[in-house]
């Protein structure tokens, strides 16, 4: 009886820890259906088991009847990861548990949500190390979106309108102000992996650095976006030839993003990099970035 009660108390304390961590640690990173994100779990702030690493959070917009599948896969034999899914009210509704390790993936599969709103995915580990996190969705009455597929689908961020008279356009994301790419510094995208496309974003500035490339409908773009120095939070957006948002993501708690997405239009696409003001640093620094990619 004593052993049972001790186990019960430990279970309750652990559950409380998950709820506290998901609300108190790093700012959440927005993702969409089809996203593939690479992150690295550094030593945790708590310094005590069971959470020996940082706790990363991602947020995803879903509606009643949507089915979502999420996977976290360690890069190498570590970290020993876990994953938690919270509903818009903050209640834990699905989890993967502990103890797989040895490079095995953890997955929450075909979970059907019952409410509209922002869902939070918490990722942590009993060890430190890098991981790949991916999200697939089957919207109710819609088409299956696998990780790596085109993720322009969204309920909260409509595609931008094109302004043929001025040649400028804007778009908006939930939690981010509109960005005008008409003033962007544009360069041709270099596909040589030994010569990354890059630049430096100054703090407290509206600088947008962009790169253009041509592609055909049905092709896929493999992109590696990194922040080698500086502390600004950076956003990256890929726009189609008709100014539709093909992909959007940000570097906030991590320094590297590796993803693949589909292209649905033929013509010139634009990659734009800029500063975002989610969880801004106390002392902002000029921040360098690099982008490499392939079309296939």
Image: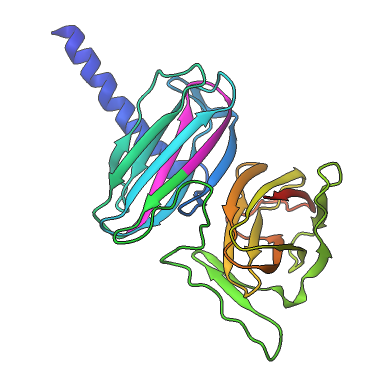
Where's the N terminus, which quadrant?
A: top left
Q: Is residue 276 above or below residue 191?
A: below
The answer to whether residue 133 is above or below residue 9 is below
Q: Quadrant of residue 257?
A: top right
Image location of residue 46, percent across then percent down: 50, 27
Is 5 in front, or is 59?
59
Would you identify the image quadrant in which residue 44 lies?
A: top right
Q: Where is residue 270 in the image (x, y as percent from the top left)?
A: 71, 65
Q: Name the one closer to the observer, 275 or 271.
A: 271
Residue 76 in sight:
yes
Does 19 sit above or below residue 3?
below
Q: Is 283 on the left or on the right of 74, as rendered?
A: right
Task: Classify residue 238 by image quadrant.
Answer: bottom right
For the image, the number of numbered tags is 0
Q: Residue at x 42, y 21 (%)?
A: 50
Q: Residue furthest right?
A: 195
> Viewed as shown, does residue 273 lie left or right of 61?
right
Q: What stretch is highlighted in magenta?
A: 117-134
* Colouring: rainbow
Q: Is residue 106 magenta?
A: no
Residue at 58 percent across and 53 percent down: it is: 261
Residue 118 lies in the magenta stretch = yes
Q: Which residue lies furthest to the top in this view?
A: 2
Pick the front one: 208 or 91: 208
Residue 279 visible from this viewpoint:
no
Task: Relative to 212, say whether 288 is above or below.
Answer: above
Q: In this view, does 127 lie to the left or right of 209?
A: left
In the image, farthest residue toward the left: 1
Answer left or right for 278 relative to 122. right
Residue 115 % position (x, y): 26, 57
At x 28% / y 19%, what residue is drawn? 10
Pick the front one: 129 or 166: 166
């Amino acid at each position: 009886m004593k052993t049972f009660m001790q186990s019960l108390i430990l279970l309750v304390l652990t559950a409380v820890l998950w709820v506290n961590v998901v609300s108190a640690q790093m700012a959440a990173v927005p993702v969409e259906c089809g996203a593939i994100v690479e992150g690295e779990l550094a030593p945790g702030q708590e310094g005590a088991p069971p959470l020996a690493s940082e706790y990363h959070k991602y947020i995803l917009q879903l509606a009643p009847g949507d089915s979502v599948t999420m996977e976290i896969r360690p890069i190498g034999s570590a970290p020993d990861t876990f994953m938690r899914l919270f509903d818009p009210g903050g209640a834990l509704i699905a989890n993967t548990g502990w103890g797989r390790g040895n490079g095995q993936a953890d997955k929450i599969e075909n979970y059907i949500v019952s409410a509209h709103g922002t869902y939070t995915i918490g990722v942590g580990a009993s060890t430190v190390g890098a991981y790949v996190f991916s999200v697939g969705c089957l919207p109710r009455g819609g088409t299956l979106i696998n990780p790596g597929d085109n993720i322009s689908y969204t309920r909260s961020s409509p595609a931008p309108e094109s302004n043929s008279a001025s040649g400028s356009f804007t778009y908006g994301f939930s939690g981010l102000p509109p960005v005008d790419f008409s003033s962007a510094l544009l360069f041709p995208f270099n596909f040589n992996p030994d010569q990354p496309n890059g630049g430096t974003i100054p703090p407290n500035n509206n600088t947008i650095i962009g790169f253009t490339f041509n592609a055909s409908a049905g092709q896929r773009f493999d992109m590696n976006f990194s922040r080698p120095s500086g502390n600004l939070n950076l956003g990256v957006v890929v726009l189609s030839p008709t100014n539709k948002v093909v992909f959007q993501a940000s570097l906030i708690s991590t320094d590297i993003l590796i993803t693949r997405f589909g292209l649905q239009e033929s013509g010139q696409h634009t990659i734009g990099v800029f500063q975002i003001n989610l969880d801004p640093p106390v002392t902002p620094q000029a921040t360098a970035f690099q982008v490499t990619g392939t079309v296939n």
